[in-house]
Structures are given as structure tokens and as C-alpha cells.
Amino acid sequence: MPVLLLDGGVVREFVEDGEAFSAAMDRRFRRADVDKDYLLSRSELLTVFEHAHIRLNSSSTSRLNDGNGLSYESDFGPFNFDKSGFIELEEFCVQMRAIFLAIADGLGFVPVEVISLDDGLLHDVANYYYLHDNSTPRNTQEI
């Protein structure tokens, strides 16, 4: 479990590299698409959150009627733009982009130490830099 020193600018650069970001989100989407129908159900989206180590707050999970771990209004609904009941890859990428940019804004431009869990969201950022730069990126280093 590497500990990284990074800032929001590093995360933002990953998101702004459209090809790399799309490829990473496509891998996450396809791993979660258990039935291989190129759509994510509510339960499949929950596995994305779980694998990325995103914890839902108790207020969103307490409103559930179907017991699958997601509140439609706060968790699933923002991903499901067309209200089809399923999430398409494009919808998934738009919302994941917003999540990554929120992380970048939260980190700001002062380097901070972050633990990169396997398959966590920041693991994608670390992989991007280590695979593309083949060196320690600006404001990112394993310590």
C-alpha cells in the first residue's frame, strides 16, 4: 500500500488527459459490469464504490427501500442522467470526472501524503503517472 505525496494539480492533470482518464474509467466500468450488458445497475454501481473505497454516509443508506446499499436520490440518481434505471459508460465517466475534480479541489495545491489503496480512486492517478512518466511526477512521490 504505497503512500503518495501529491496535490490537486496532479489529480487534475490525470482528469484532463482525456485518453488516460477514459481508459481508467472504462476499466472500472467493465469490472463492475458483472452481466456484461454495458450498463451498470444500482448493485453494480455499489461495487464500484466499494472497490474504490468510497463509503456512503449512513443517511443515504438508511433511506433505502430495496436494501441494495444505494439511495436513488443521492447516490444512483446523479449517475443516471436519462433516468433509464441503468448507468451507461458516458454517464459513469461524467460523474466520475466530477468526483475526481472534487478530490483535486479538496486537495488544493499543497502536497499532502495520501495512502493509495489497491483499486482506490487515487490508485488510478498513481498508475497514470508511473506508467506515463516512468519517473516520479511533479508533486507526486512514493514515500
Image (cartoon, helix red, strand yellow):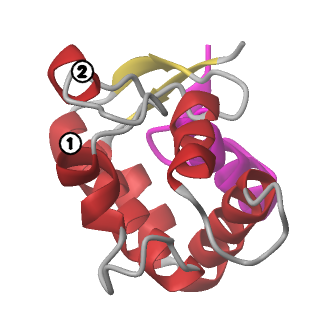
Q: Residue at x 20, y 42 (%)?
A: 109
Identify the residue at image location x=75%, y=60%.
33
Using the numbered discs, state the Cα–Cα distance from disc 2 to disc 1 in whole angstroms: 27 Å
Q: x, y percentage for residue 24?
A: 68, 63
Q: Is residue 139 magenta?
A: yes
Q: Residue at x 48, y 73 (%)?
A: 93
- Residue at image coords 29%, 47%: 75
Measured along the vertical axis of the image, is residue 116 above or below residue 39? above
Where residue 13 appears, x then y in whole percent?
43, 65
Which span of residues is magenta-colored?
Answer: 120-143
Task: Using residue 30 as the reference point, say whether residue 11 is left or right of it.
Answer: left
Q: Quadrant of the N terminus?
A: top right
Q: Can you identify the residue that label 1 sits on? A: 109
Count numbered badges in the picture. 2
Which element is circle 2 on?
Answer: loop
Q: Quadrant for the C terminus, please.
A: top right
Q: Is 86 colored magenta in this rendering?
A: no
In the image, 21 versus 27, the foreground residue is: 27
> Where does residue 84 sit, x and y in percent of width and height?
41, 81
Q: Is residue 117 above or below residue 13?
A: above
- Lower sequence index among marks 2 and 1: 2
- Mark 2 residue type: Asn
* Position of residue 94 in the picture relative to residue 59 (left or right): right
Residue 57, numbered circle: 2
Q: Is residue 89 left or right of residue 111?
A: right
Check disc 1 and report its element: helix, strand or loop.
loop
Residue type at the position of mark 1: Phe
